[in-house]
Amino acid sequence: MLKGIPAILSPELLKVLCEMGHGDRLVIADGNFPAQSIGGNGIVIRCDGHGVPELLDAILKVLPLDVYVEKAVHLMEVVPGDKVETPIWDIYKKIVVTHDEREVKTIGYLERFEFYEQARTAYAIIATGEKALYGNIQLQKGVVV
């Protein structure tokens, strides 16, 4: 056990977060995301039973976002014509605002297949049990100062 580390961050996940360098990307994926096929050649960490919001908040307590890019956080855009509401995005925005002084200005959006392509080159993908549709989020790691 360690002091000050959110309990939801497993030793495996903490190791990966420590290994990541400046500019590396991390995907926190919802339960529908094809984590194994997209991240099959990289690191996939299973966090089944957990949702994205609690993992996002815990991760942002220990992982700085990249200040050298305009958008250090990316969400997957809703596919045109898909009539899906995304209330989980409001939760993500509240979490990001508490951890980054740029607030929602650091959040961008990627078209679905562009999100997948970027996820293929992410340092790691965290596969969650999140049930919200379009609940995927990418973070770009910054530097600890």
Image (cartoon, rainbow, N blue to C red):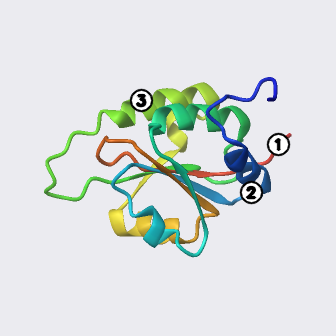
Q: Nearer the viewer, residue 75 or 33?
A: 33
Say left or right for 67 vs 126.
right
Badge 1 amino acid:
Val
> Residue 4 falls in which quadrant of the image?
top right
Per the image, label 1 sits on a secondary structure element best described as loop
User: Which residue corresponds to mark 3?
Assistant: 91
Q: Are marks 3 and 1 in contact (CB under 8 Å)?
A: no
Q: Is the residue under label 2 in contact with that under label 3 (CB below 8 Å)?
A: no
Question: Mark 1 sits on what residue?
Answer: 144
At label 3, which amino acid type do we have?
Ile
Q: Residues within 10 Å of mark 3 (few under 14, many from 20)?
A: few
On screen, residue 26 versus residue 52, left or right, reads right
Q: Mark 1 Cα within 10 Å, few/some/many (few <14, many 20+)?
A: few
Q: Is residue 39 depicted above or below 102 in this figure?
A: below
Q: Which badge, 3 or 2, comes first in the chain's sequence?
A: 2
Look at the image and tell me whether residue 67 can be seen.
no
Helix, strand or loop at mark 3: helix
Coordinates of residue 113 in the picture (x, y in percent):
36, 69
Residue under label 2 = 20
**Position in image of residue 31 (x %, y %):** 37, 50
- Quote the CA–CA distance across marks 1 and 2: 12 Å
Give the spatial CA distance, label 3 vs label 1.
25 Å
Residue drawn at the location 38% of the way across and 31% of the way down: 90
